[in-house]
Image (cartoon, rainbow, N blue to C red):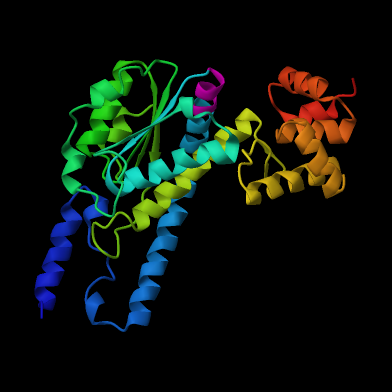
Amino acid sequence: MVSKRYVDRSLRENRVSANTTEHLHDSAVGLDQRPPVEIAALLASGQVAAAACVQQAIPAICAGAEAMARTINAGACLHYAAAGSSGLMAAADAQELGGTFSIPAAQLRIHMAGGLPMGVEMPGDTEDATDGLAAAMAELSEKDTMIAVSASGSTPYTIEATRIAKSKGATVIGIANNAGSDLLNMADHAVLLATPPEVLSGSTRMGAGTAQKIALNTLSVLMAVHLGHVHDGMMVNVHADNIKLRARACGIVAQIAGVPETAARDTLDAAGGHVKTAVLMAATGLARDAAQARLKDTHGHLRPALERTV
């Protein structure tokens, strides 16, 4: 058994480290000797505490979301760059943007150290591998935005991706869990998620990853609001390519336009599956072409299109 004196000394030494993500949690002493119900409760409370830290980053998240929306409106690309667990969080957000908000795949790029894993193994040494990044980011421009994610804020792969993005004049949103880290210092929009030490020291797939996911989701939804893809909490630019999403799209049309679902379904078909167009057609009686023209006038925003009287 490890002595209490040794653990206390390790705790003190860990706290000297500048990287909070590597510190030992104050309640971790004797963790493995506790009843499972206590361990589980501590693990869960660690996630809750990490999630709460996102609130402090709201101003930076709001500014970053505006930058992302500008990039999409300009026809440019969003680049997600990260490694390890942070890479999985970033990739998950990027891969949902097509289905949820119909963001074209041509405007999205994922740069993950070692590439997106195809199996259950994710080698850790790829975090240090920067070869090939310059080639992968060769077409990045000043109109693009990069969302770079690193719990430590010092991952070599993510730092190099950020350096390349900055050299090309792109906007960088940096998401990290350590204050004063290189990534946050380099970023145009520094999203500090000051999560407490992990209950399982250094396992940033836990609390840090939870906070990263919340921040990423908040960024992309706020971006969608700016783009006009959200109306009363509904995803009015959803790409309805399966049974569940077609039913959701139909329900959205019925809800906003105030028509029966049968009428909503027929209108959605007539609109070519485009939810905003279908809502406008069902609510105003406009033909498809006229509805699309009005949406173009309002830059894709449904509410002002509905409120127009002519």
Left or right for 88, reference 245: left
Q: In the image, is residue 205 above or below residue 74?
A: below
Please state the horizontal and vertical placement of residue 17, each as a whole percent of the image. 17, 51
* Res. 57 visible in picture: no
Q: In the image, is residue 278 above or below residue 33?
A: above
Is 198 covered by the magenta stretch? no
Please state the horizontal and vertical placement of residue 287, each as a whole percent of the image. 85, 24
**Magenta residues, start to end:** 68-74
Locate the C terminus and report the quarter of the image it occupies: top right
Left or right for 76, reference 83: right
Give the quarter of the image for residue 113.
top left
* Res. 146 visible in picture: yes
Residue drawn at 35 percent across, 29 percent down: 187
Residue drawn at 26 percent across, 64 percent down: 200
Left or right for 195, reference 302: left
Left or right for 204, reference 53: left
Q: Give 220 or 96, whichever is nearer the viewer.
A: 96
Is 73 covered by the magenta stretch? yes
Residue drawn at 61 percent across, 46 percent down: 242
Residue drawn at 28 percent across, 28 percent down: 161
